Image: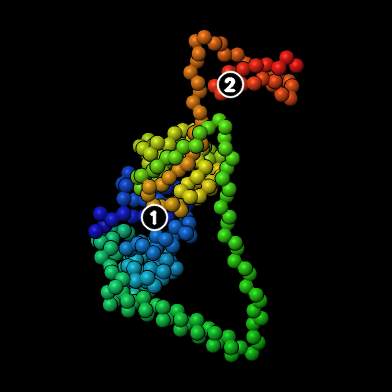
């Protein structure tokens, strides 16, 4: 039922739905994630537009349409969708547990669901055929130009170069929902929400996220996009973690030195101690 279900919602604005309920999962707007989630969902709750409702009906998935308040067109849409496909489309002014339970009780294999989705698909095919027939009867045929090519898939960024001041560390985020990190422009973790999935998983302030799952990232935006597209858990993050500052040595003083030359002329031992110095 609605109380036991996991609800995933799409963020279209920077604001995040504040919820302490781990059954509510947010993700930023993403075509890839939207399609993947649509293919496996049991029910859909959305405003009363057209595209999402029809996507659900074509799949035989029940959809609860909630018109945007004060939007007359959506009020009419919701009523029309319900009248056309009563087995798959319900509508309410506000979301209720009864409405959610109704949506979750649907089964795309039932005769009513199959009939509704077949009806919509048949109407779409019929209108497409009618449009083609109408075009063929025009006295002046439209001059169809070649379709522009689809944009190429964005190339995955290359692996970033090694950072000698940091060590590469894998962090596993197990908990569902938002990761809960605040990122700087370069992808470095500036802060975390207390008790967040990132904090629980072992992410540290100062870590720079360079890989999310199988995708290399370069900066805040690419990290955010990769996390939003990776709704499954566990989520593996690869981070550059700064080396800790070495402990003070009571037998040595720490001093700052300034060099003007092109080379230092110093050979170092593996532990960083100066082994020899070129007198030149």
Pointers 2 and 1 in contact (C-beta within 8 Å): no
Question: Which residue is pictured at 47% across the width and 59% down the height?
Answer: 32
Q: Secondary structure at mark 1?
A: strand
Question: Which residue is pictured at 42% across the width and 66% down the height?
Answer: 52
Residue 85 can be seen, yes or no = yes
Residue at the top extreme, as displayed: 251
Q: Residue 164: x, y in percent?
A: 57, 32
Instruction: Measure the alpha-carbon separation of dots 2 and 1.
Output: 56 Å
Vertical placement of 225 versus 185: above or below?
A: below
Q: Which mark is residue 98?
A: none
Vertical placement of 174 versus 135: above or below?
A: above
Question: Which residue is pictured at 49% across the width and 39% down the height?
Answer: 239
Query: Label 1: few (<14), some or many (≥20) within 10 Å?
Result: some
Q: What residue is shown with label 1?
A: 9
For the residue pair 238 and 52, the one nearer the viewer reads as 238
Question: Which residue is pictured at 41% across the width and 71% down the height?
Answer: 54
Q: Residue 66: x, y in percent?
A: 36, 62
Give the quadrant of the C terminus: top right
Query: Label 2: few (<14), some or many (≥20) within 10 Å?
Result: few
Question: Horizontal placement of 195 versus 29: left or right?
Answer: left
Q: Which numbered disc, 2 or 1, marks the residue closer to the eye? A: 2
- Dividing the picture into quadrants, the one containing residue 53 is bottom left
For the residue pair 88 and 182, the one nearer the viewer reads as 182
Q: Residue 257: x, y in percent?
A: 65, 16
- Dividing the picture into quadrants, the one containing residue 67 is bottom left
Q: Which mark is residue 269?
A: 2
């Amino acid at each position: 039922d609605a109380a036991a279900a996991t609800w995933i919602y799409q963020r279209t604005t920077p604001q995040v739905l504040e919820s302490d309920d781990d059954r509510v999962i947010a993700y930023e707007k993403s075509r890839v994630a939207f399609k993947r989630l649509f293919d496996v969902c049991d029910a859909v709750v959305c405003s009363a537009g057209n595209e999402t409702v029809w996507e659900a009906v074509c799949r035989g998935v029940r959809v609860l349409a909630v018109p945007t308040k004060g939007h007359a067109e959506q009020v009419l849409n919701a009523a029309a969708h319900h009248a056309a496909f009563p087995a798959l489309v319900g509508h309410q002014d506000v979301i209720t547990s009864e409405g959610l339970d109704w949506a979750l009780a649907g089964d795309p294999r039932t005769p009513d669901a199959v009939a509704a989705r077949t009806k919509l698909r048949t109407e779409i095919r019929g209108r497409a055929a009618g449009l083609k027939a109408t075009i063929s009867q025009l006295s002046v045929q439209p001059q169809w130009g070649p379709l522009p090519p689809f944009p190429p898939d964005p190339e995955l960024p290359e692996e970033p170069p090694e950072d000698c001041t940091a060590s590469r560390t894998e962090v596993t985020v197990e908990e569902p929902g938002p990761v809960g990190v605040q990122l700087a422009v370069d992808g470095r973790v500036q802060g975390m929400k207390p008790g967040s999935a990132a904090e629980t998983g072992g992410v540290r302030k100062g870590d720079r996220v360079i890989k999310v799952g199988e995708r290399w990232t370069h900066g805040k935006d690419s990290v955010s996009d990769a996390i939003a597209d990776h709704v499954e858990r566990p989520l593996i993050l690869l981070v550059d973690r700064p080396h800790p500052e070495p402990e003070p040595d009571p037998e040595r003083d720490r001093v700052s030195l300034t060099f003007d030359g092109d080379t230092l002329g110093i050979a170092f031992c593996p532990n960083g101690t100066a082994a020899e110095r070129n007198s030149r």
